[in-house]
Image: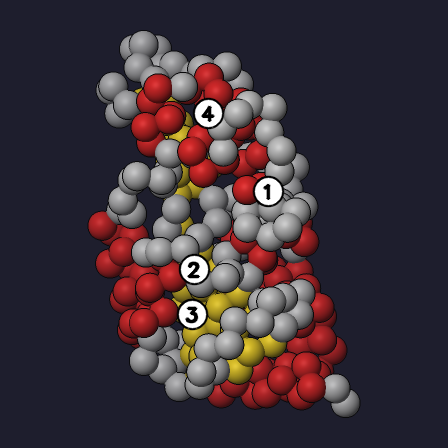
Amino acid sequence: MNNETCKIKELKKNIDKSKRIVLFTGAGISVPSGIPDFRSANGIYNEKLKSNYRPEEIISHSFFMSHPDIFYEFFKEKMVYPTAKPNIAHEYFAQKEKEGKLIGVITQNIDGLHQMAGSINVVELHGTVHRAYCMRCGKEFDDTSYYLDKIPHCSCGGLIKPDVVLYEESLKDKDIKDAVSLMESADTLIVVGTSLIVYPAAAFINYFMGDNLVLINKSHLGLKNCLEINDDIVNVIKELREIE
């Protein structure tokens, strides 16, 4: 029995005895669904773009306002994946919520895959591509048809903005409050697929005061006092299901 298998058995014990699990996810949980992450060697931030702008610059509020055409070209090509489906990990944790073991999901992702898998209590810290609103009249758009035009505008003439948190923008107060409340209520926190270097989102784990902190990530993070499993989340879930 290898070391990672031993850790997965320990994870299974933690899940079994926990009553208030909270899941905190980053891009790594959605990579198996065909959505690239941002910071890895093959991530979006390291791709060569047609424009001379850096991805971090394009997805900023000021750039969106000054160059909405370039923003939306990048947004449609690199940030929206309409055919992506939830994978086994999204489905596993949605099932744990149905069983009453998991009390909520806090995600940095904007893809909506947790909800597609059946998760109900989801805090989307960085918003979602599945909503947008008019910056002039406030009209809301609840599907992805808003970005079909090169520069989408509302019937009032206002510029339509995806309901995602861009650089230079703050997280929503309600999302902050809900995320902190979940962290403080959890007896087990499972962190999946995030480098924990994106602030302020990564700071939320400081509010966790429970017994079991679990990190599941391909790369080693080296946090103290936690169970760290360095493997693809899909492999971890498959092994969990085999021993259930």
Local secondary structure at mark 4: helix
Task: Assess disc 1: are there few (<14), some (14-19) or many (≥20) residues with their C-alpha within 10 Å of its C-alpha.
Answer: few
Name the mark on residue 71: 4
Q: Quadrant of the C terminus?
A: bottom right
Q: Nearer the viewer, mark 2 or mark 4?
A: 2
Farthest front residue in view? 52
Mark 2 or 3: the one toward you = 2
Q: Examine the image and state in which quarter residue 1 appears.
A: bottom right
Nearest the eye: 87 or 203: 203
Tag 3: residue type?
Answer: Val
The image's colouring method is secondary structure
Q: Secondary structure at mark 3?
A: strand
Disc 3 from disc 1: Cα separation: 31 Å
Q: Earlier in the sequence, mark 3 or mark 4?
A: 3
- All told, the count of numbered labels is 4
Front residue of 50/17: it is: 50
Density class for disc 3 (Cα within 10 Å; few <14, some 14-19, many ≥20) is: many
In the image, taking residue 176 as reference, residue 87 lies left or right, namely: right
| Nearest to N terminus: mark 1 or mark 4 | 1
Look at the picture and state if 117 lies above or below 211. above
Residue 203 position within the rendered picture, expressed as x and y whole percent measured from the top left: 33, 64
The type of residue carrying mark 2 is: Ile
Instruction: Name the residue type under label 4.
Output: Phe
Horizontal relation, residue 231 to residue 78: left or right: right
The residue depicted at 71 percent of the width and 75 percent of the height is 239
